Image: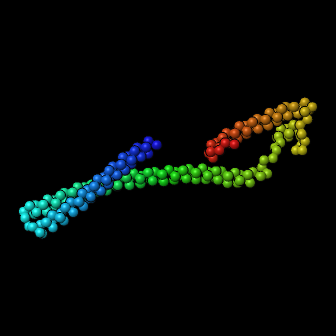
């Protein structure tokens, strides 16, 4: 912001200077034109009457034109330099805007592609997880309690009590651990794709 303000101020100063120089150049061109008219008259006088005074008058106008022409060339060189500086500032501002727009596009592309990569991976994982997310049973605990695969713990059976308690505790702990890790993973994914659900 500060750089653009500084450049805008510098540009305004240069444009004002350019305007003054162009005005001065116009004045010098008009001066040359008037002196040229005077020279034409002096040359006509010299043709009619070749006196020293008329010759001096022609020389005076010729010197004045040369002097004013040199002054005009100096002013025109300044105008060209100021124009070059103005062009450089305009080009720098244009490039800065191009760079800013390109940076915005890069950031948008980056974010969009991250999200697309996440979407593709999530679709693949969903496909791979199909059939692997069903319920599980405490088979080892059931076997230790003397139960078959399709049998369940009997809460009223005192012999089943330690196995049922261990099963319930382990199941609750497994769910809590999975949910905690999943929430941590989701927080990382949300940060990665820069979205909050």
Q: Residue at x 63, y 47 (%)?
A: 193
Q: Is residue 14 left or right of residue 44?
A: right
Which quadrant: the C terminus?
A: top right
Please identify the residue farthest to the right as the structure is shown: 156
Q: Is residue 102 visible?
A: yes
Q: Position of residue 97 (x, y in %)?
A: 48, 51
Foreground of the two, 55 or 87: 55
Q: Residue at x 17, y 58 (%)?
A: 64
Q: Position of residue 92 (x, y in %)?
A: 42, 52
Residue 175 sits in quarter: top right
Note whether 66 is above or below 132 in the view shown: below
Q: Is residue 118 left or right of residue 99?
A: right
Residue 32 sits in quarter: bottom left
Foreground of the two, 106 or 123: 106
Q: Residue at x 34, y 52 (%)?
A: 19
Please identify the residue farthest to the top as the structure is shown: 158
Foreground of the two, 189 or 132: 189
Q: Residue at x 19, y 61 (%)?
A: 38
Q: Is residue 121 visible?
A: no
Foreground of the two, 38 or 117: 38
Q: How many marks?
A: 0
Please identify the residue farthest to the left as the structure is shown: 52
What colouring style does the render use? rainbow
Please identify the residue farthest to the bottom as the structure is shown: 47
Q: Position of residue 111 (x, y in %)?
A: 60, 50
Q: Position of residue 161 (x, y in %)?
A: 87, 31
């Amino acid at each position: 912001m500060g750089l653009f303000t500084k450049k805008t101020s510098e540009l305004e100063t240069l444009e004002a200077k350019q305007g003054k120089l162009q005005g001065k150049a116009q004045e010098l061109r008009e001066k040359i034109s008037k002196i040229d008219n005077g020279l034409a008259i002096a040359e006509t006088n010299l043709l009619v009457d070749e006196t020293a005074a008329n010759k001096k008058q022609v020389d005076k106008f010729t010197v004045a034109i040369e002097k004013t022409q040199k002054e005009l060339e100096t002013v025109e060189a300044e105008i060209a330099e100021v124009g070059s500086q103005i062009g450089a500032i305009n080009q720098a501002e244009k490039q800065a805007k191009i760079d800013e727009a390109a940076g915005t596009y890069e950031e948008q592309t980056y974010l969009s592609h991250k999200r697309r990569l996440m979407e593709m991976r999530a679709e693949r994982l969903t496909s791979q997880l199909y059939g692997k997310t069903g319920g599980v049973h405490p088979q080892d605990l059931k076997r230790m309690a003397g139960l078959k695969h399709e049998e369940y713990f009997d809460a009223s059976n005192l012999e089943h009590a330690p196995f049922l308690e261990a099963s319930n505790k382990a199941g609750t702990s497994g769910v809590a651990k999975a949910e905690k890790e999943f929430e941590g993973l989701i927080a990382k994914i949300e940060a990665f794709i820069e979205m909050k659900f």
